Image (tube, rainbow, N blue to C red):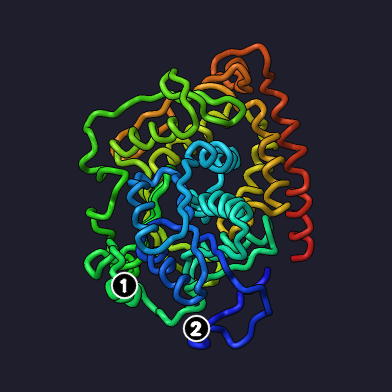
Amino acid sequence: MTKPRKRSAKTSPASHRSASPIQKVVLAYSGGLDTSVILKWLQEEYRCQVVAFCADIGQGEDLQEVKRKALAVGASKVYLEDLREPFVQEYVFPMLRANAVYEGSYLLGTSIARPLIARRQVEIARREKAQAVSHGATGKGNDQVRFELSYATLDPKLAVIAPWREWAFRSRQDLIRYAKAHRIPVTASKANPYSTDLNLFHISYEGGILEDPWKAPPESIFHMTVSPERAPDKPQSIEIDFERGNPVAVNGQRLSPATLLATLNRLGGTHGIGRVDLVENRYVGMKSRGVYETPGGTILHAAHRGLESITMDREVLHLRDSLIPRYAELVYYGYWFSPERLILQKTFDETQRDISGTVRLKLYKGNCTVTGRRSTRSLYRRDLATFEEGQHFDHRDAGGFIRLNSLRLAIHRGQRTVRA
């Protein structure tokens, strides 16, 4: 990937590849502290046009206000695009079909948004004939890798400007001071130091008091869910319909992917479902504490697993499950467009051909419990599983099965006895 030429020795690395002068940059812009400072900094440092791109993936912001802010800070053009449906259908649902969970807890809400933003950013850069793209990820985080691996796959000729790896700022307090000096309106402050990422799938919180893994997250930070202690005292039962591994309806009503997820976010949030507090291993090598809310995603994972339990062959399920950690790592590390992720996706999608049916769940005070599952593709046979009298299973057959499977164990034990 080509490195851009720097214009200031103060912020330039010691060495870099030669490149064409940067005349136009497409910036992944959120309107927050980091990207607002970056928008101004790019103009001053590179003396170039900056095209701001803001993707609506369900963050719930007033995007017209984001556009006005970008133009006020100096953007030459602003792209606002509603990507909620493709985000859920083309990114969240494939990940759901794979049951992807990173390190047993993280449902990858931030990770899965980056390749979508990067892909559209590259497409805009081509349309605008820009020479570079830029992002607001720090040098300590995973997002820089996710963005830049995607850029490299989609258009390796584009230069990449990563301000956090170039400029002299070392903290968000430095950015706050810069923003005030340049009259850039920001919402971050010493009283609200959290770094958050919100989309239709989840919200994450990092920084501030959360950097001490012993301190509990304050209740005031949570956005999508009520405290389980304050959730309704009466449980709620819901049903979710699936077709080939994809959720298509809630309580019998067919919904678009984004609307379905938003509906489950509301239901799960009401019952305090989907909070996770974990210390994860970042790709760059350090441990990081993050707090997440993923109400709809938590419900969908439980429902999907519940339906698979009656529709997926045992050995297929076990083999698929053995590959989930690798798939989740690829998403977390930023290899969404890699050939290995695409191969795994095809494998997982093949396992979903018969994952159609309905799951009933009970939502209650932070818990999401499967209480029923049914499918025309079910492999569950009551006449075989019953403890009552049945005509299709001869209990005597189990004796030979056990003897054959215990043969090697007996041989192994005998050899150990002889050696002793």
Q: Secondary structure at mark 2?
A: loop
The residue that appears at 27% across and 61% down in the rendered structure is 187
Q: Nearer the viewer, residue 368 or 217?
A: 217
Q: Secondary structure at mark 1?
A: loop
Quarter that holds the C terminus: bottom right
- Mark 1 closeness class: few <14, some 14–19, many ≥20 residues within 10 Å: few
User: Vertically, is 327 above or below 367?
Assistant: below
User: Which badge, 1 or 2, is on the more N-terminal residue?
Assistant: 2
In the rendered image, residue 230, in percent from the top left (x then y), is placed at 20, 41
Q: Which residue is mark 1?
A: 182
User: Vertically, is 62 above or below 196?
Assistant: above
- Mark sitting on residue 158: none
In the rendered image, residue 322, in percent from the top left (x then y), is placed at 65, 48
Q: How far separated are the C-alphas under marks 1 and 2? A: 19 Å
- Mark sitting on residue 11: 2
The residue that appears at 50% across and 52% down in the rendered structure is 104
Q: Nearer the viewer, residue 293 or 2?
A: 2
Q: In this rendering, would 42 be left or right of 66?
A: right
Within the image, what quadrant is residue 321 found in? Answer: top right
Q: Nearer the viewer, residue 362 or 171?
A: 171
User: Vertically, is 358 above or below 346?
Assistant: above
Q: In this rendering, would 237 be left or right of 326?
A: left
In the rendered image, residue 196, in percent from the top left (x then y), is placed at 36, 58
